[in-house]
Image: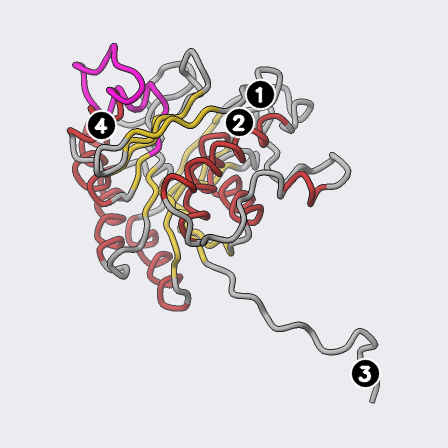
Amino acid sequence: MSTDPAGPPPPAPHVPVCLSIAGSDSGGGAGIQADLKAFARCGVHGTTAITALTAQNTVAVTRVAAVEPAMVVAQIEAVAADFTIGAVKIGMVGAVDVIAAVAVALDALPAGTPVVLDPVMVAESGARLLPADAERALIELLLPRATVVTPNVPEARVLAGAAAAALDGAALAEAVQAVGANAVVVTGGHRAQAIDVLVTVDGATVEIPGHRYPDGAAHGSGCTHSSALAAHLALGFTLAESARAARAIAAEAVRYGLRDLGAGPGPVNVLGVGYGDVHAVANSGRLGAPA
């Protein structure tokens, strides 16, 4: 009987598990496709519960089909029955019945499971992506269940309401907290300076500066950011450490974005594909082991 000249395999490492509850992007730039790539870059195993199927590319979304709520819950339950979920990322949720089902499923997870909510509510054009009843359901059912919510400026203003229309930075994050959020990270992509602002549940403010890459490709950057944040929470980092890592990883994913793919804005490139030493690029933003 032949033996492997390399010897027995090394002991299997402990790899945390993250769950993405989000929609599918057939173009591979955002949604669960972006989430799984971000999870892999950060060194965690990605699992999914798909809430919607989208027919899209870099130019347009041509069709959306919602997944029935019972199937969304079944996916979450199947993952939770076989894996210890280290953190959850929530992205596109769509309709009220799906939001309600996700809320019930979250309550069945072990207490203290970190939940990162990326409120996919406003398109780059400014158009609202959720009907008014779904916006209310997200605020009432998911916002208080999330450990941290990661809106950009337009999304944060929708969450906080009309009185927040002129707010920015920490004041805007606090306005989101006032409607039921715990910790809030207002991302810096739509701000005059590319600075993320974290306001913790205790009221502490942490500014997270970073580079802006206007010549990069940004489709999927929000998904990448929230997934990287969830992954680092699953790895045992603090919220502030996780937010800093997510900021760096999302920025680099834009910097190395695949600008030449498709006729529209290209997808982010969180794994550094096509840039030679992929592993060196992919690990450039990851923190060391938590203390």
Q: Is residue 283 above or below residue 157?
A: below
Give the x, y percent position of residue 135. 23, 29
Q: Earlier in the sequence, mark 1 or mark 4?
A: 4
Q: Are marks 1 and 2 in contact (CB under 8 Å)?
A: yes
Which label belongs to residue 265? 1
Tell me the residue that label 2 is attached to. Answer: 219
Q: Is residue 156 magenta?
A: yes
Compute the Cα span from label 1 to label 4. Answer: 29 Å
Q: Amino acid at mark 2?
A: His
Mark 3 element type: loop
Q: Nearer the viewer, mark 3 or mark 1?
A: 3
Considering depth in this image, is 115 or 65 the residue closer to the camera? 115
Q: How many marks?
A: 4
Tell me the residue that label 4 is attached to. Answer: 176
**Which residue appears at 22% of the width and 27% of the height?**
176
Compute the Cα span from label 3 to label 4. Answer: 60 Å
* SS assignment for the magenta stretch, majority: helix
Q: Amino acid at mark 3?
A: Thr
Q: Amino acid at mark 4?
A: Val
Residues drawn in magenta? 150-171
**Which residue appears at 30% of the width and 39% of the height?**
148
Compute the Cα span from label 3 to label 1. Answer: 50 Å
Give the x, y percent position of residue 236. 42, 54
Which label belongs to residue 86? none
Tell me the residue that label 3 is attached to. Answer: 3
Please tell me in which quadrant of the rendered image residue 145 appears.
top left
Tag 2: Cα neighbours inside 10 Å, few (<14), some, or many (≥20)?
Answer: many
Tag 4: Cα neighbours inside 10 Å, few (<14), some, or many (≥20)?
Answer: many
Q: Earlier in the sequence, mark 3 or mark 1?
A: 3
Q: Earlier in the sequence, mark 3 or mark 4?
A: 3
